[in-house]
Amino acid sequence: MLVCSCNFITDTEIRDVINAFLEEDCWQLIVPGKVYHAMQKRGRCCGCFPNVVDIIVSTTEEFHRKRNFADEKVVDFMERLRRFEEEQKTALRERRNPRVA
């Protein structure tokens, strides 16, 4: 599936990069900019970044599940990622819809 139409990047390419990062350090924080940098691409309109975050979260969950890491560590880590994602989405919505005083 095409995730970024500006750079013609598919979800498979993104998942491959994420898995490579996780193989290096399975507890590192992976963000869209880091993924794009590894592919030697740049976010242009950055409209795909929320979808890339979702792919990062789901790929990381799957990676840890397959490796049979201690469930409490995975759950804690993934919960922190979800909270971070929600905070970022809220901040983005607030920037897009500024309140007029």
Image (tube, grey):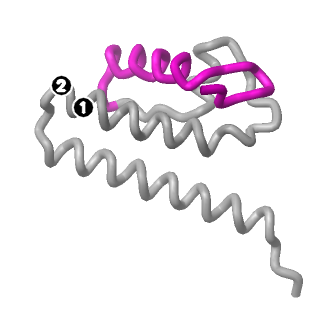
Q: CA distance from mark 1 to mark 2?
A: 5 Å
- The residue type indicated by label 1 comes to His
Q: Is label 1 in a helix, a strand or a loop? A: helix
Q: Position of residue 32 (x, y in %)?
A: 59, 33
Residue at x 76% of width, y 27% of height: 5
Q: Which residue is denoted by mark 2 in the rendering?
A: 67
**Circle 2: residue type:** Arg
Residue furthest bottom in the image? 101
Return the residue found at the far right. 100
Q: Is residue 95 above or below residue 54?
A: below
Using residue 17 as the reference point, say whether residue 78 is left or right of it.
Answer: left
Mark 1 crowdedness (10 Å alpha carbons): few <14, some 14-19, many ≥20: some
Name the residue that disc number 1 marks. Answer: 64
Q: Which contiguous range is marked in magenta? A: 1-27
- Counting from the top left corner in percent of width and height, residue 97 is at 80, 70
Left or right: residue 59 versus residue 89 is: left
Along the line of sight, the residue nearer the viewer: 20 or 25 = 20
Few, some or many residues within 10 Å of mark 2 (<14, 14–19, 20+): few
- Figure check: 58 above or below 22: below
Considering depth in this image, is 39 or 65 the residue closer to the camera?
65
Is residue 51 covered in magenta? no
What residue appears at the point 80 percent right and 26 percent down from the top-left corner? Answer: 6
Instruction: Look at the numbered disc 2 and give the secondary structure of its residue.
Output: loop
Is 3 inside the magenta-drawn segment? yes
